[in-house]
Image (tube, grey):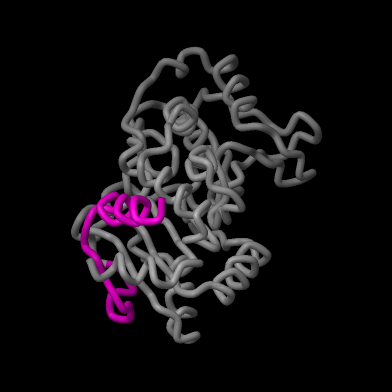
Amino acid sequence: MDILKELVSRNNWFVLTGAGVSLDSGIPTYRDSEGNWTRSMPVENQDFIRSSDVRRRFWARNMVGWRFMSEAKPNQNHLHLARIQKKGGISCLTTQNVDGLHQKAGSTDVIDLHGRLDSVTCLSCELKLARQYIQNVLIENNPHYAEITGAILPDGDAEIDKIPYGSFFVPDCPNCGGILKPDAVFFGDSVPKHVVSKAIDSLKSSNGVLVVGSSLNTYSGFRFCRLAKEARKKLIIINKSPTRADNITDIKVSADCSEVLSEWAAFIS
């Protein structure tokens, strides 16, 4: 396999992962095999901040989705990547996912490009709280919603749009009464500059960029492909569907992530 030769010969890869890596953990992707969007648009950052109705809708859906997300387990993709990192094949693991499954699998120094869902911060006083604490408060104050089920969505929400949200209780910050928001980058928001800078510094010291399971349709991930080409580093993409960087990549493998990662992990073990 040509891609395996490239991966093994270089080592110290900057790896960027997307939703396709977590698919086998039961967390769906945003797009289908043709690259088409498969769900309604998620909540936008400014709408969440401005509207109490939007926040009620968000937290009702997120309360249902969190029951699944909090119990999701790493799959073989996460485990292979953790093993490869420990063997020196990966110098930096950066993910667009917000599920924390790379860390659960044993990967270290992961850059969570879009943040994490397992913590919540007050937008006013910056008090940080565990997402599970918020879940307990939501369940206690919304018993009629607590047992509702719905299809899980990529960002931890659940598809329950036919449920009325008008009476749903949303907790405020217990410290100052401010708005609580998960520590994830919402649509319309920007990745924090210090996070981007850390990832770029890691890319500069790597021997190449490997994209796994991402369509790269958002600029937050695509930028690393452009930087790789500008630095004349090898760029490899593993993704079943088309990606935004297909026309600039050195190697594109349209296959399941596990096919390549299992070969790579086996070779270096």
Say which residue appears at 48% left-offset and 33% top-offset.
Answer: 62
Q: Nearer the viewer, residue 238 or 66?
A: 238
Q: Position of residue 171 (x, y in %)?
A: 65, 28
Q: Is residue 9 visible?
A: yes
- Image quarter hosting the N terminus: bottom left
**Horizontal and vertical percent position of residue 187:** 48, 56
Say if the magenta span includes residue 263: yes
Q: Is residue 46 visible?
A: no
Please tell me which residue is depicted at 63% across the width and 38% down the height of the picture.
119
**In the picture, residue 221 is in which quadrant?**
bottom left
Q: Which residues are magenta?
A: 243-269
In this rendering, is residue 219 above or below 214?
below
The residue closer to the viewer here, 265 or 210, is 265
User: Is 146 part of what is drawn in magenta?
Assistant: no
Q: Image point 31% across, 69% down: which residue?
A: 5
Rendering coords of residue 51 (x, y %): 57, 44
Does residue 100 sit above or below 84 in this rendering?
A: above
Q: Residue at x 36, y 49 (%)?
A: 21
Towards the viewer: 244 or 73: 73
Q: Residue furthest left?
A: 34
Where 67 sits versus 158, above or below? above
- Horizontal side of 149 relative to 198 (left or right) equals left
x then y, percent, for residue 87: 50, 55
> Which quadrant of the view contains residue 189?
bottom right
260 and 185: which is toward the camera: 260
